[in-house]
Amino acid sequence: MAAKAASSLQMARVRPCISTSHRAFKAGVAFVSGVSKKASLAKLASAGHLSSAQPLHRSFMSSSVKLDKFVTKAMAEFSDSKPVSGLSIDLRGKKAFIAGVADDNGYGWAIAKSLATAGAEILVGTWVPALNIFETSLRRGKFDESRVLPDGSLMEITKVYPLDAVYDSPEDVPEDVKANKRYAGSSKWTVKEVAESVKQDFGSIDILVHSLANGPEVSKPLLETSRNGYLAAVSASSYSYVSLLKHFVPIMNPGGSSISLTYIASERIIPGYGGGMSSAKAALESDTRVLAFEAGRKHKIRVNTISAGPLRSRAAKAIGFIDTMIEYSLENAPLQKELSADEVGNTAAFLASPLATAITGAVIYVDNGLNAMGVGVNSPIFKELDISKSNH
């Protein structure tokens, strides 16, 4: 599916590379498939359309860790020998910062891959307590399979920054968090400090992606949610986007694009999606419109959000009923197929590209059309109707 999506968008072509080892993650369960150094590109591309990695020859840097075997460059090298006809998503020369990448099977990772496919240089911000696991997994090749782009070339990450978007500046960090061993060894991880570090390292960026959310009481009904739990959900899931834009917009080039991720629970009742998370997503969508006006008028930055359908990611498992939501979508959405993370990633690449220069303040649904439905057609009350179904 990723290959089809890339070809239909006519993304710029990149130079292929060969990987050394492969390990894919799907549905939160890891599986390993060995591939020799001389494996063909065809085999790499067909291995679930996931990604792989080449031996990395430059230092992989974070503010706290240096990984000697990792390339610190994420921008794919493109061949100009063959012209690309028609409309193409060309992000060569652009830098993208994706906040909220901590593994290889969420929407943030998929967005990074699509942006890299189009030529963007990739920087990521990883939640501090997950930083060591993320970098260790990269170093040991656990994400190798997932780094293969649709044409067989590799997604590379220029730099990983520790980030906790709940805190705007060092003054906001409580003493108990500073003393927490999960934060030991990391520094400059508040939003303000990360923006300053990116400015110092790269000068400016063109694309900002917010792919993070957290609701400590998400499994609780709203009526049982505490004030602290509710405010924590809004802080981590919606205000964090305001804070990111506030601190990153000054270093974004005019004409740049910012994208966040939302969910249909912002406007429809989704029982089980509690703890104030539905409220946080509603706030995020409202903020998207206001931020589009303010960032657009003052900085010429476009601001949009993608309302993505359910994905069987590790983060989604915290909700506790993700499999049920996926099955519901399969039964009731106009398109009866499971949503691919690549489809969300490709939409983000489009929104970040010159093809979307007049789109801002929008909620873009990427959910197989489920948002358009008013009823669940799998209900027994519709059993007498002749409703076409596909064999999904």
Image (cartoon, grey):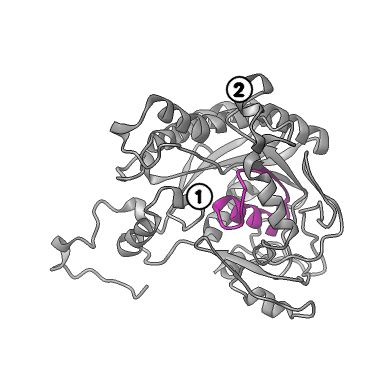
Disc 1 crowd rating (10 Å Cα; few below 14, some 14-19, many 20+) is some
Q: State which quadrant residue 118 falls in.
A: bottom right
Circle 1 or circle 2, nearest the eye: 2
> Percent position (x, y) of residue 71?
82, 55
Inspect this view and state whether residue 208 appears: no
User: Tag 2 or tag 1, which sits nearer the N-term?
Assistant: 2
User: Total marks drawn?
Assistant: 2
User: Against 300, is 52 above or below?
Assistant: below
The answer to whether residue 116 is above or below residue 95 is below
Q: In terms of depth relative to the viewer, which is nearer, 349 or 53?
A: 53
Inter-mark Cα distance, 1 to 2: 25 Å
Left or right relative to 339: residue 111: right
Q: Which amino acid lies under the numbered mark 2 shown in the image of this protein?
A: Pro
Q: Which residue is drawn at 60% across and 25% down?
A: 176
Q: Name the residue under label 2.
A: 174
Q: Could you say which disc has been placed on residue 315 in the image?
A: 1
